[in-house]
Image (cartoon, grey):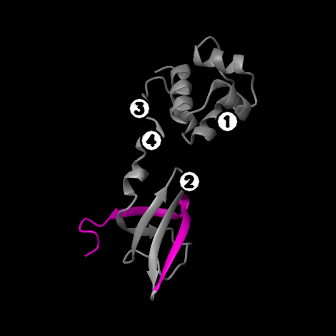
Amino acid sequence: MTLGEKITLLRKKKGLTQESLSEVLDVSRQTLSNWEKDNTIPDIIQSKNIAKFFKISLDDLLDNKLEIECKNNSNNILQNLIGKQCNLVMHEDYIDPFINYNSNVKVLDANNSFIKIEYQKGKKIINKIIDLDIIISIKVIEDGGK
């Protein structure tokens, strides 16, 4: 897969136009179009910015032997967690005595950056939004936690 094909695929996955991505990368739309058509290639700094924006390694972006499979975010794996009871494992630096591996939480919403959960603290129901970078793993409770 060429660099241009990867840029096009990743851009479309994020639902971006060439115009909007070119603004983010601080290049002209025509420059981005030329990259996507493999007429030209971004320099190393631009390539690094592209990789960082799409949250992939520079090596993976530039490796023509590596294929990338994408689908739009409407079928995001996190979306499949909505409404389910889960156990969350948090990064060791995160301290919340009510959310740990043994605590059941209900996933209310999720996107590529945050997960919104609900859990019980005594008799009170708490809703919380948590940065995905804090979460190490999510285990779905098959029987709904019963």
- Residues packed near mark 3 inside 10 Å, few (<14), some (14 to 19) or many (20 plus): few
Magenta-highlighted residues: 124-146
Mark 2 lies on residue: 113
Report the number of numbered marks: 4
- SS under mark 4: helix
Q: Mark 1: which secondary structure?
A: helix
The question of residue 10 being in magenta is answered with no
10 Å crowding of disc 1: few (<14), some (14-19), many (20+): some
Please tell me whether residue 144 is drawn above or below residue 122 in the rendered image: above
Helix, strand or loop for the magenta stretch, by majority: strand
Q: Earlier in the sequence, mark 3 or mark 4?
A: 3
Q: Residue at x 67, y 23 (%)?
A: 42
In the visual, does 50 lie left or right of 81? right
Q: Label 4 belongs to which residue?
A: 74
Residue at disc 3, secondary structure: loop
Mark with earlier residue (3, 1)? 1
Residue 55 in the image: state x and y as whole percent.
56, 42
Left or right, 38 with reference to 85: right
Residue position marked by numbered label 3 in the rendering: 69
